[in-house]
C-alpha cells in the first residue's frame, strides 16, 4: 500500500473509531493506538498537501454531538490537548514553553486527568444557566437538565468567602465513580443489557440520556479544572481554581504548582502508582502553564493550546499465551466470548481469563490459538486483551479464532442484535443457560424476592426435572420452607412481577414505567408498537422486545399459569387510585420553596397525575409550579417565553387537593 492509499485507509479507520468512541461509547482500540494512527495520518498528509481534505479526522476535534439534544455554539472553542506517553516528550514540551517565553521563569500546574466527558458550565449572577458538552469543539449539546442532577455541581454559588464574577464559564469533566459504575453494570446485567466497557463510556451514555431521572439515579460526579471569563479573580490558573473551590465547585485537591521539571516528574511518578487508590478513573496528568498572561503569549495551534499538554499513563500490561476461547450464554441469550490464557500476574492479581466482548472486538484483535497476547486491566479492574505481543513471532498453528455462528449449548443459529455489537441465541424457551438464568432472575431480591431459593438449589431442581419455567416454583410441595417462601411472593406488586418475567431489555425502571402506563398485563400484551413508543423512557429496542415476547404462545401460556398461581398482574386499588390524568401530557418545572409539600413530594404528585417533571424552562414547558424565592433567572426566562406561573395553592386546586 503506497502513502496515498494509506491516507485514505487511515481516514476511513479513524472515522469509524471516532464513531465507536463518541457515539456508540464502545471503543475497540486504545487511546494510544488511536493517537498513533492520527499522528501517522497527519505526517502523511503533510507529505501530500494535494490530498488535503476538510473532512479529514486531522481537521477536527473528536465529536460527541447527539441529534437528540439542542446544539449550541461555544462562546470560546473547547480544543483538545496534545497527548504524550513518555517523560522525554514532557521534557520537550517544557523546553518549548521555555523557548516560547524567551527564557522567562514560569510555573506549571500539574493536575490529575480525569477519564470522563468534558463539560462547559455557564454561570450568571451566581447561578447555573447552561451546561454544554465539548461536542466538536466549536459547538456542543445542551445537557443542562441532566447536569442539574449531578450533586457535586452547584446550582447556586457560595459568595460568602469571596466575590463571584457576574458571569463566567468553568470547564471540567463529568465522570462516573467506580462504585456507581459497578452498580450500574450489575443492574444492566440483571436486565439483560450490554455492559459498559468502562466508567468513561458509562458517564457519556448517562449524560446523553433523554430522561434526567435516569441520570440522577446513576450517580455521576464532576471535577472542574479551568475558569474563563472577563472578570475572573486572579492572574494565575491555580489561584483561580482555588477561588472556584471556595465558591462551591469540586476542584481536585491534588493540583500542584511545579517550579522545575524535576518537581513535575516527581508528581507524575507519584500518581502513576497512587491513582489506583482513587474512587474515580484517571488516565494521566494535565500540565498547564500557570500564568494566564504567559498562556496568552504562547497562544494556540489549530487544534490545541501550546501552553498545555496531557501526559497519558501507560496501562500495566502482561504477556501470556492464549489457549482457547470459550463462549458463554447469558440469561437473555447474549453470547460472550471469553479468552482462557496461561495465568499471569497483573496489577497485583493472577489473571487467566478475559472477556473479548463481541465479534467486532475479536475481528479487530485477529486472534489465533497459541498467540502471545498482551493483557491489561481496564481502569485497573477488568482484564482485557489489547493486542499481540510484538516480542514474539507466533506461527498460529491453532488457526484463527472466529466468532461462532451457533449457540454453544443448544446449537440454534445466532442472531446479531440490531443496533448492537452482540449476538444472541433466539431459542430463549429451550436453551438451558437462558432458562436457568431466568429462574435465578425470577427469585432475585428486586424481582419476586424468594429468598430461600438460590442458584445451587435452582440448578439442582432443573437437573432433576422439577423446574422447567418460573411457574413451576408454585408447584413445589416437598419442601415446606421453600413452598412457604414461594407462596409469600404472590403479594409482590405488578411492576416487580413484570420485571421478574425477564423480558429482554425490560429492566426494573422500564417495568415500573410500563406497569403505571398500562395498569395491567392484558393491556400491555395487547399494546401496539406505537402505543409502547408513546410511553416515556420506552424506545424502539424495548418496544420490539415486548412485541416479540407477547407474540409467543408459550409466553402467553406462562403468564396464564402465573395468574392461576395468584400473582399480581394488575396495579393495586391503592396504586390505581393514586393516579389520574389531570396533568396528562404536561411538562412542569418546579421552582422555589413550598409550604404544604416538599419539592420531592410535588414531583411524585405530578407523576401520579400524569404530568412530567422537567428541570429547565423551554417553549415546551406547560407551566412552572412556583413557591417562594423562585430563582430570578427562571422568572425572567418564563416571562420571555410566555410560560405560565402557577402558585402552590393554584396547583393544589388544579389537582383537587384544595
Image (tube, rainbow, N blue to C red):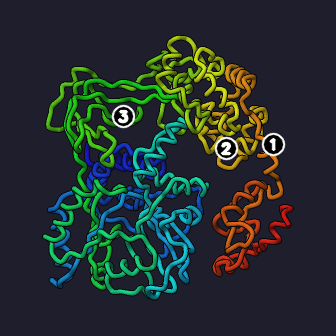
Residue at the image point whose x is 38% and y is 56% from the top:
57
**Image check: 555 left or right of 404?**
right
- The CA span between labels 1 and 3 is 48 Å
Q: Is residue 228 above or below residue 14?
A: below
The label nearer to you, 2 versus 3, is 2
- Name the spot of residue 328 as percent of width and height, x first: 42, 26
Between residue 95 and residue 658, name the one nearer to us: 658
Inspect this view and state whether residue 215 appears: yes
Residue at the image point whose x is 58% and y is 30% from the top:
450
Residue 573's label in the rendered image is: 1
- Name the spot of residue 32 as percent of width and height, x first: 28, 51
Q: Is residue 517 above or below residue 156?
A: above
Q: Quadrant of residue 518?
A: top right
How packed is label 1: few (under 14 Cα within 10 Å), some, or many (20 or more)?
A: few
The label nearer to you, 1 versus 3, is 1
- The CA span between labels 2 and 3 is 33 Å
Mark closer to the chain start, 1 or 2 = 2
Q: Which residue is mark 2?
A: 512
- Name the spot of residue 278 as percent of width and height, x first: 32, 57
Please report contact status of discs 2 and 3: CB closer than 8 Å, yes or no.
Answer: no
Q: Secondary structure at mark 1?
A: helix
Amino acid at each position: 500500500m503506497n502513502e496515498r492509499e494509506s491516507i485514505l485507509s487511515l481516514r476511513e479507520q479513524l472515522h469509524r473509531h471516532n464513531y465507536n468512541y463518541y457515539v456508540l461509547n464502545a471503543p475497540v482500540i486504545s487511546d494510544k493506538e488511536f493517537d498513533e494512527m492520527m499522528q501517522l495520518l497527519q505526517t502523511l498528509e503533510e507529505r501530500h498537501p494535494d490530498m488535503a481534505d476538510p473532512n479529514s479526522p486531522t481537521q477536527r476535534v473528536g465529536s460527541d454531538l447527539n441529534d437528540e439534544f439542542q446544539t449550541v455554539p461555544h462562546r470560546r472553542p473547547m480544543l483538545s490537548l496534545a497527548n504524550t506517553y513518555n517523560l522525554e516528550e514532557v521534557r520537550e514540551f517544557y523546553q518549548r514553553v521555555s523557548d516560547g517565553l524567551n527564557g522567562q521563569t514560569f510555573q506549571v500546574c500539574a493536575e490529575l486527568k480525569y477519564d470522563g466527558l468534558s463539560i462547559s458550565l455557564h454561570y450568571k449572577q451566581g447561578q447555573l444557566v447552561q451546561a454544554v458538552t465539548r461536542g466538536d469543539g466549536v459547538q456542543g449539546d445542551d445537557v443542562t437538565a441532566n447536569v442539574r442532577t449531578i450533586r457535586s455541581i452547584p446550582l447556586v454559588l457560595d459568595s460568602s468567602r469571596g466575590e463571584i464574577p457576574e458571569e463566567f464559564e468553568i470547564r471540567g469533566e463529568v465522570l462516573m465513580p467506580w462504585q456507581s459504575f459497578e452498580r450500574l453494570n450489575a443492574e444492566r446485567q440483571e436486565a439483560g443489557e450490554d455492559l459498559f466497557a468502562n466508567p468513561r463510556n458509562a458517564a457519556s451514555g448517562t449524560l446523553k440520556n433523554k430522561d434526567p431521572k435516569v441520570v440522577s439515579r446513576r450517580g455521576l460526579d464532576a471535577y472542574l479544572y479551568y475558569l474563563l471569563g472577563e472578570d475572573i479573580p486572579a492572574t494565575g490558573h491555580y489561584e483561580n481554581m482555588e477561588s472556584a473551590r471556595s465558591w462551591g465547585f469540586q476542584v481536585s485537591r491534588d493540583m500542584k504548582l511545579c517550579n522545575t521539571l524535576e518537581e513535575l516528574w516527581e508528581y507524575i511518578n507519584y500518581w502513576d502508582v497512587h491513582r489506583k487508590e482513587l474512587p474515580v478513573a484517571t488516565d494521566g496528568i494535565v500540565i498547564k502553564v500557570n500564568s494566564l498572561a504567559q498562556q496568552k503569549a504562547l497562544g494556540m495551534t489549530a487544534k490545541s493550546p501550546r501552553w498545555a499538554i496531557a501526559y497519558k499513563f501507560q496501562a500495566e500490561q502482561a504477556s501470556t499465551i492464549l489457549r482457547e476461547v470459550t463462549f458463554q450464554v447469558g440469561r437473555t441469550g447474549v453470547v460472550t466470548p471469553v479468552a482462557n490464557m496461561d495465568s499471569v500476574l497483573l496489577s497485583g492479581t493472577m489473571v487467566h481469563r478475559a472477556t473479548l466482548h463481541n465479534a467486532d472486538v475479536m475481528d479487530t484483535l485477529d486472534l489465533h490459538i497459541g498467540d502471545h497476547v498482551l493483557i491489561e486491566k481496564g481502569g485497573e479492574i477488568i482484564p482485557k486483551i489489547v493486542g499481540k505481543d510484538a516480542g514474539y513471532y507466533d506461527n498460529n498453528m491453532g488457526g484463527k479464532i472466529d466468532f461462532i455462528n451457533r449457540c454453544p449449548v443448544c446449537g440454534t443459529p445466532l442472531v446479531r442484535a440490531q443496533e448492537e455489537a452482540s449476538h444472541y441465541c433466539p431459542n430463549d424457551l429451550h436453551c438451558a443457560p437462558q432458562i436457568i438464568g431466568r429462574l435465578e432472575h425470577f427469585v432475585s431480591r428486586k424481582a419476586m424476592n424468594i429468598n430461600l431459593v438460590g442458584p445451587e438449589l435452582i440448578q439442582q431442581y432443573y437437573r432433576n426435572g422439577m423446574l422447567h419455567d418460573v411457574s413451576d416454583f408454585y408447584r413445589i410441595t416437598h419442601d415446606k420452607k421453600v413452598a412457604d417462601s414461594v407462596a409469600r411472593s404472590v403479594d409482590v406488586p405488578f411492576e416487580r412481577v413484570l420485571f421478574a418475567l425477564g423480558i429482554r431489555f425490560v429492566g426494573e425502571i422500564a417495568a415500573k414505567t410500563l406497569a403505571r402506563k398500562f395498569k395491567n398485563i392484558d393491556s400491555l400484551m395487547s399494546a401496539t408498537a406505537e402505543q409502547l413508543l408513546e410511553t416515556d423512557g420506552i424506545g424502539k429496542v424495548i418496544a420490539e422486545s415486548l412485541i416479540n415476547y407477547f407474540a409467543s404462545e408459550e409466553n402467553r401460556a406462562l403468564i396464564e399459569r402465573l395468574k392461576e398461581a395468584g400473582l399480581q398482574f394488575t396495579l393495586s386499588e391503592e396504586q390505581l387510585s393514586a393516579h389520574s390524568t389531570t396533568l396528562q401530557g404536561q411538562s412542569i418545572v418546579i421552582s422555589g420553596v413550598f409550604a404544604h409539600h416538599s419539592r420531592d413530594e410535588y414531583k411524585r404528585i405530578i407523576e401520579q397525575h400524569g404530568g412530567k417533571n422537567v428541570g429547565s424552562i423551554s417553549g415546551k414547558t406547560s407551566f412552572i409550579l412556583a413557591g417562594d424565592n423562585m430563582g430570578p433567572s427562571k422568572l425572567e426566562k418564563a416571562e420571555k417565553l410566555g410560560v405560565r406561573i402557577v402558585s402552590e395553592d393554584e396547583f393544589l386546586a388544579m389537582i383537587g387537593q384544595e
